[in-house]
């Protein structure tokens, strides 16, 4: 048994001690019984591990690898065009595992313990998927990985695309993916949404669709996705990722849809750093932000989380797995920084993400659940966000994944009295 004491538990003022036995939380509270091993958290902020609800682990660090093949583009569609060339000529199961591990390392050292990764299955050899299925198993003690069978190049841009998505599910992916706005005609986008929902129900899988990742307000596949999962009562197991065009829709349409989103209880993932970089490219000025209506979702009780999306791939050269950076960008872009917002904004990279992975029943600092949590180098949520706080320790099943010291100066800055 071990006891973590003197922690400031996020959203729980009644608790400062966590008692752990066999990797599980057995008691929470104050002045709990004495045990042999006591770890003092120094009054710092303790919260559940960060959740990355949207990442492309089979692409991470491929931008550096692709440099030789001439990928110098900054736009989404050009990058997607270049991707097959790389896949054919350079991608192997070993290369995917090697680079994905690097990306997982980035995420874990910034406090993430749960990752939902979209894996491209438009390769009939399933190189990326096979690599990711192996990594999911090999690293399961250190990180929970959820895999989406994702047709990067669409299901109907060539023959047999939908079969590859289905095969990915049979091979062990957890979730059905799609990219309706990239299909060659609106009808095919709609057809893909129908197929995604059918496949999810046939194989009892989750759904996560790259949905309307464009500024074109006529891209409204989220409407059909929402209607189908509402009808099938499948909303809590469904996530619409990106929904950028919803930020460009007119208000009367948006308010009607928000009402319907509330009914279906569908989840949303917004990728603020990636989409502010990729969207608005055809705009001159004013330039759109490319974000969905995050603030309105929160105000209406619709679940929305922030994710990383990319780390150094053809779509996005930056990214380092630090979700405090993503959160900082996201709350600026979505304009959510009132005192009340700041008290709960960490939800966007913790609890809300867990709902997008549909793991909310096993996630969080509660008695009976796995002793998984992180300690931030600040004393309050608002200060942690303002300072993009470092993660001092990450505890998984009661053991340290890592533990480090706060920054120490050799020479202290002194401005006098
Ligand atoms: Zn994505």
Image (cartoon, rainbow, N blue to C red):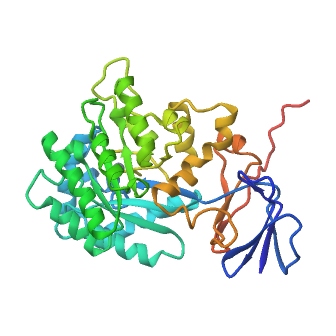
* Residue 57 x/y as whole percent: 38, 60
Residue at the farthest right position: 417
Residue under the point 42% across and 65% down: 146
Res. 47 image quadrant: bottom right
Residue at the farthest left position: 159
Res. 279 image quadrant: top left
The quarter of the picture where the C terminus appears is: top right
Left or right relative to 224: residue 56: right
Residue 345 visible somewhere in the drawing: yes
Res. 135 image quadrant: bottom left
Please say if 187 is above or below 152: above
Residue under the point 63% across and 71% down: 369
The quarter of the picture where the N terminus appears is: bottom right
Residue under the point 14% across and 46% down: 188
Residue at the farthest top position: 285
* Residue 225 x/y as whole percent: 30, 47
The one nearer the camera, 310 or 179, is: 179
Q: How many marks?
A: 0
Left or right relative to 267: residue 231: left
Residue under the point 50% across and 46% down: 303
* Residue 209 x/y as whole percent: 32, 51
Left or right relative to 39: residue 175: left
Residue 271 visible somewhere in the drawing: no
* Residue 46 x/y as whole percent: 71, 57
Left or right relative to 44: residue 77: left
């Amino acid at each position: 048994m071990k006891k973590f004491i003197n922690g400031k538990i996020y959203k729980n003022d009644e608790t400062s001690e966590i008692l752990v036995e066999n990797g599980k939380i057995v008691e929470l509270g104050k002045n709990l019984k004495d045990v042999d091993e006591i770890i003092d958290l120094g009054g710092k902020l303790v919260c559940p591990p960060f959740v990355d609800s949207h990442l492309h682990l089979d692409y991470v660090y491929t931008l550096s690898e692709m440099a030789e093949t001439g990928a110098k583009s900054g736009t989404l569609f050009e990058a997607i065009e270049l991707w097959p060339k790389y896949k054919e000529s350079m991608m192997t199961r070993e290369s995917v595992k090697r680079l994905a591990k690097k990306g997982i390392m980035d995420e874990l050292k910034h406090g993430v313990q749960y990752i939902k990764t979209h894996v491209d299955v438009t390769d009939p050899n399933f190189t990326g998927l096979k690599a990711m299925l192996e990594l999911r198993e090999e690293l399961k003690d250190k990180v929970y990985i959820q895999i989406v069978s994702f047709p990067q190049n669409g299901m109907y841009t060539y023959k047999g695309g939908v079969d590859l998505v289905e095969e990915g599910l049979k091979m062990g992916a957890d979730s059905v993916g799609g990219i309706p706005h990239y299909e060659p005609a609106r009808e095919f986008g709609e057809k893909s949404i129908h197929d995604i929902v059918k496949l999810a129900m046939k194989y009892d899988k989750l759904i996560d669709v790259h949905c309307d990742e464009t500024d074109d307000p006529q891209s409204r596949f989220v409407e059909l996705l929402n209607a189908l999962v509402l009808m099938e009562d499948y909303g809590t197991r469904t996530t619409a990722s990106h929904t950028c065009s919803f930020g460009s829709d007119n208000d009367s349409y948006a308010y009607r849809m928000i009402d319907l989103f509330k009914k279906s209880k569908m989840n949303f993932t917004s990728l603020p750093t990636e989409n502010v970089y990729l969207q608005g490219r055809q705009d001159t000025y004013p330039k759109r932000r490319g974000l969905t209506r995050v603030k309105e979702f929160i105000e209406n009780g619709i679940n929305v989380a922030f994710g990383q999306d990319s780390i150094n791939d053809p779509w996005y050269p930056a990214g380092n797995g630090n979700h405090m950076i993503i959160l900082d960008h996201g709350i600026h872009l979505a304009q959510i920084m009132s005192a009340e917002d700041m008290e709960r904004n960490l939800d966007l990279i913790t609890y809300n993400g867990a709902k997008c992975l549909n793991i909310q029943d096993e996630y969080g600092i509660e008695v009976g659940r796995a002793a998984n949590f992180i300690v931030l180098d600040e004393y309050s949520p608002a200060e942690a966000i303002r300072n993009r706080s470092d993660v001092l320790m990450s505890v998984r099943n009661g053991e340290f994944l890592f533990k480090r010291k706060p920054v120490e100066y050799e020479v202290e800055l002194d401005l006098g009295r």
